């Protein structure tokens, strides 16, 4: 149980276009999902907390107009990178908690990640 | 704010060698501690976790970690590594309570096990 799926796993786009990444919890409901960005040889940086039915909470330094997050249902959150530029190229990872079985312990389940390359 | 430090960035070991990866965190209150592993080409997976109770926790694949509160440490250990343990290892700390509490990751340690 507790599977999180991301799509697409890889995407290449032209500079100036927008890209949408989907994150789904397959066998549990997630009222909260988290979006991380991972730079090469670096740690995961929390970008934002996605809350079902309300606005996302962004970490300091993350442009909310650049990285649009929508959490329309209890099993789906999307991250849209708007007007992408080469510096947005990175590995984006979503995660979610299964509060039902893990409670408020903080344990997260991760998607496979999406590698974005902006040309 | 909480922070996590992993001192070893890249570790190379021969098979059967013992492993210890350091992890220190900074947060004065109650914490939940995790080690995640990322095998090449795969997503992050939970290796083990500490919430309370016995400070020596055992995880999957023979890994264990010891929580030493006085040292703010949660080091990962394995008595005898295998080639298949080659991966990136991340220590993480969750401070606070509630569903919105955040997980903060260390910079990761790349473990390379040679035959």
Image: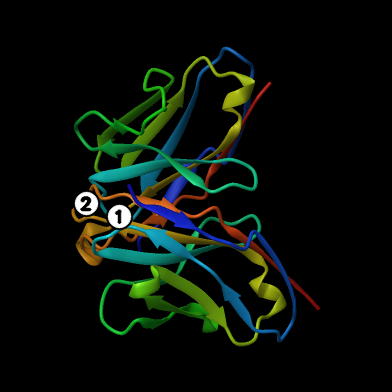
Q: Residue at x 41, y 22 (%)?
A: A63
Residue A57 at what x, y percent from top left? 28, 33
Q: Are marks 2 and 1 in contact (CB under 8 Å)?
A: yes
Vertical side of A79 occupied by B77: above or below:
below
Q: How many marks?
A: 2
Q: Which is more toward the observer, A44 or B38? A: A44
Residue B44 at what x, y percent from top left? 51, 58
Q: Residue at x 41, y 60 (%)?
A: B25
Judged left or right of residue A38, residue B66 is left
Vertical side of B42 occupied by B85: above or below:
below
Vertical side of A101 occupied by A117: above or below:
above
Disc number for residue B99 = 2
Judged left or right of residue A119, residue B62 is left
Q: Residue at x 54, y 79 (%)?
A: B77
For the N terminus of chain A, give its image quadrant.
Answer: bottom left
Residue B111 at what x, y percent from top left? 67, 66
Circle 2 — which element? loop
Q: Residue at x 54, y 69 (%)?
A: B22
Marks 2, 1 in one chain: no
Per the image, the residue denoted by label 1 is A97
Judged left or right of residue B112, residue A56 is left
Q: Which is more toward the observer, B49 or A8? A: B49
Residue A94 at what x, y percent from top left? 43, 44
How was this image coloured?
Answer: rainbow
Circle 1 — which element? loop
Chain at tag 1: A
């Amino acid at each position: 149980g507790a599977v999180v799926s991301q799509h697409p796993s890889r995407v290449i786009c032209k500079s100036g276009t927008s890209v949408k990444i989907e994150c789904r919890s397959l066998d549990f409901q997630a009222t909260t999902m988290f979006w991380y960005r991972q730079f090469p040889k670096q740690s995961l940086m929390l970008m934002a907390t996605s809350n079902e039915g309300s606005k996302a909470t962004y970490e300091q330094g993350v442009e909310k107009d650049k990285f649009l997050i929508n959490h329309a249902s209890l099993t789906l959150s999307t991250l849209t990178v708007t007007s992408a530029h080469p510096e947005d190229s990175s590995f984006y990872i979503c995660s979610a908690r299964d509060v039902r079985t893990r409670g408020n312990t903080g344990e997260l389940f991760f998607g496979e990640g999406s590698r974005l390359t902006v040309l | 704010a909480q922070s996590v430090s992993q001192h070893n960035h890249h570790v190379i070991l021969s098979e059967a060698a013992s492993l210890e990866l350091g992890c220190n965190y900074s947060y004065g209150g109650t914490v939940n501690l995790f080690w995640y592993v990322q095998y090449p080409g795969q997503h992050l997976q939970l290796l083990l976790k500490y919430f309370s109770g016995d400070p020596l926790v055992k995880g999957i694949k023979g890994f264990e970690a010891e929580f030493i509160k006085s040292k703010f440490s949660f080091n990962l250990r394995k008595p005898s590594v295998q080639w298949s343990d080659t991966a990136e290892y991340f220590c993480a700390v969750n401070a606070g309570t509630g569903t919105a509490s955040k997980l903060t990751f260390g910079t990761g340690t790349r473990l390379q096990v040679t035959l």
